[in-house]
Image: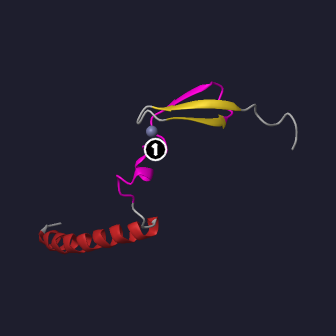
Amino acid sequence: MAQSIHPATQTVHVLCGGCNNKFDVVSSYQSEELRIELCYNCHPAYTGKRKISKAGKIDRFAARYEKRSTDLMTKTGTEADSSQKKPE
Ligand SMILES: [Zn+2]
């Protein structure tokens, strides 16, 4: 391991404001105390209180595009009828 290129590390006391959880981490953070709003104890992704979509971005895009394309098809059908009535 090369010397003098790594930052100095120390034990930092982390205080969570969301659930009052306290734990220690070794970090290069420049203070002995770090206050955070969310931690592993109260974050929705870890507590399971909020559902997180497991579908991928492509799946969500395909579902959204499919819905919009069907909406557009019905809208363009009505718009095509109204545009034909307009005089030029
Ligand atoms: Zn917390």
Identify which amino acid the numbered label 1 is placed on.
Asn
Q: Is residue 78 above or below residue 53?
A: below
Over which residues does the magenta segment extend? 27-52
Rendered-image quadrant of the C terminus: bottom left
Residue bearing mark 1: 41
Rendered-image quadrant of the N terminus: top right
Residue 43 covered by magenta stretch: yes
Quadrant of ligand 1: it is top left
Residue 87 versus residue 44: which sits nearer the camera?
44
Residue 17 versus residue 22: which sits nearer the camera?
22
| Lateral position of residue 75 relative to residue 58, left or right | left
Residue 14 image offset from top left, x and y in percent? 55, 32
Residue 69 versus residue 33: which sits nearer the camera?
33
Which colour style is shown?
secondary structure
Q: Is residue 8 above or below residue 72?
A: above
Q: Which structural element holds mark 1?
A: loop
Residue at 46% across, 44% down: 41
Residue behind label 1 places its C-beta within 8 angstroms of ligand 1: yes
